[in-house]
Amino acid sequence: MTGDEKDAPGPRLLSGGNPQVPKGEGDAPVQRYVAAMPGWKQAIGKRLDGLVERTVPGVHKAVKWNQPFYGRDAEGWFLSFRCYTKYVQVQFLRGTSLEPMPPKPSKHDEVRYLDLHEDDEMDEDQLRRWIEQSSRLPGARM
């Protein structure tokens, strides 16, 4: 790495610390987003991304509206996440169809959220079940 690359500023952080990265399809934009997640949030982003990849082989990825999205190619999106000041929010786009429903309601009819704070113990078994269920539902079009 040259001195210029080392000193180059990273992506700008938006309100709440959400990285502003260029939109794009595929794994590379998602990895840029995860790498730009500040502090402890980056470890959560890596765990979420890896969990989705292991649970849904061949998952389609993209960055839209400054957050990673996961889906089934032409079938739409089932999950996304983004950074807020005190947590990383996982968005299940058909969350009201999941058993049990993720805990946090949304103003959007079918969406449910899971907020992951710095000291939370991530329940990967429950997340995997929600990801499995989500990936089998019709995806959201965006």
Image (cartoon, rainbow, N blue to C red):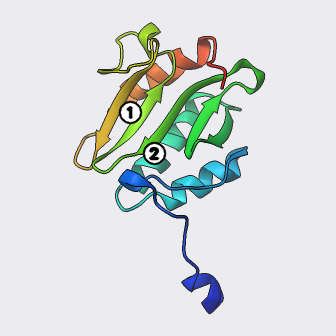
20 sits to left or right of 139: left
Picture quadrant of residue 103 = top left
Q: Which amino acid lies under the numbered mark 2 shown in the image of this protein?
A: Arg
Circle 1/circle 2 CB separation < 8 Å: yes
Q: CA distance from mark 1 to mark 2?
A: 9 Å
Q: Residue furthest right?
A: 74
> Does residue 122 appear in this view?
no
How far from the left and from the top, in percent, is residue 122? Answer: 32, 38
Quadrant, the N terminus:
bottom right
Q: Residue at x 47, y 38 (%)?
A: 81
Q: Which disc number belongs to residue 104?
A: none
What residue would you read off at disc 2?
Answer: 47
Specify the quadrant of the image occupied by residue 120: top left
The spot of residue 20 in percent (x, y) is 55, 55
For image coordinates 56% across by 54% down, the residue present is 33
- Using the image, tell me which numbered label, if any, was put on residue 124: 1
Q: Residue at x 60, y 55 (%)?
A: 21
**Is residue 48 positioned above or below 96 on the image?**
below
- Disc 2 packing (10 Å; few <14; some 14–19; many ≥20): some
The mark nearer the N terminus, 1 or 2, is 2
**In the figure, 122 relative to 102: above or below?**
below
Crowdedness near tag 1: few (<14), some (14–19) or many (≥20) residues, C-alpha within 10 Å: few
Residue 61, how many percent across, how many down? 67, 38
Res 71 seen here: yes
Q: Amino acid at mark 1?
A: Glu
Residue 133, position in %: x, y? 51, 15
